[in-house]
Image (cartoon, grey):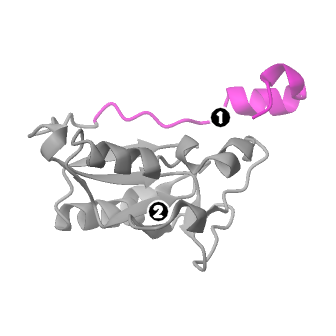
Amino acid sequence: MPRLEDLSDTARQGHLNFPAMEHDDAPFAPLRKPLSEAKLALVTTAGLHVRGDAPFASGDQTYRVIPSSSAAGDILQSHTSIGFDRTAFMRDINVTFPIDRLRELVGDGTLGRLSERFYSFMGAQRVPKKIIEETGPEVAAKLLDEGVEAVLLTPT
């Protein structure tokens, strides 16, 4: 990602004044069991998808399913933005999507197990109406149906 001081004044002001949403009404949901017994899912806004799936387009508010058994090399990023540098992701997927680290935590007993499916959305949404009203609740229902007890959210 470029440094603010390296951007033009217009671009810098655009970043500084980006209309971020605030959710003061988000309920606190305490974990009901130790992580070592919990089923965890990974959800990201990094615009990731499995090789062969349709890539995300700009403003896309749908989601992609990433099987938790996917090899790291089969997960691609189609998130397009001049606002970040993808080099770190290309070198190590775990920077954005810590799939290998989560498997290690399951392996050493720190984490109970992983869900069968992870989910990815496209980030940098200016007006995420469809995510709030449709696709977000749809993914939440899928997570609940699978018995997921904790979710790790990773942005880009």
Looking at the image, residue 113 sits to the left or right of residue 155; the answer is left
Q: Residue 116 in the image: x percent, y percent?
A: 30, 67
Q: Which residue is the extreme one toward the bottom?
A: 52
Q: Is residue 18 above or below residue 134?
A: above
Q: Residue 113 in the image: x percent, y percent?
A: 23, 54
Looking at the image, residue 138 sits to the left or right of residue 22; the answer is left
Looking at the image, residue 60 sits to the left or right of residue 15; the answer is left
Q: Is residue 43 above or below residue 87?
A: below
Q: Nearer the viewer, residue 108 or 31?
A: 108
Looking at the image, residue 155 sits to the left or right of residue 145; the answer is right
**In the rendered image, which quarter contains the N terminus?**
top right
- Give the residue at x 69% y 26%: 16
Q: Mark 2 falls on what kind of element?
A: helix
- Contact? badges 2 and 1 (CB < 8 Å): no
- Give the residue at x 88% y 24%: 6
Q: Is residue 133 above or below residue 54?
A: above
What residue span does the magenta drawing correspond to? 1-25
Instruction: Say if residue 107 shows up in the picture.
Output: yes
Q: Earlier in the sequence, mark 2 or mark 1?
A: 1
Q: Mark 1 falls on what kind of element?
A: loop
Q: Which residue is mark 2?
A: 130
**Residue 49 falls in image quadrant:** bottom right
Q: Is residue 130 above or below residue 32?
A: below
Q: Which residue is mark 1?
A: 18
Q: Amino acid at mark 1?
A: Phe
**Residue 2 falls in image quadrant:** top right
**In the rendered image, which quarter contains the C terminus?**
top right
- Give the residue at x 49% y 37%: 21
The magenta stretch spans residue 61: no
Q: Residue 33 in the image: x percent, y percent?
A: 9, 40
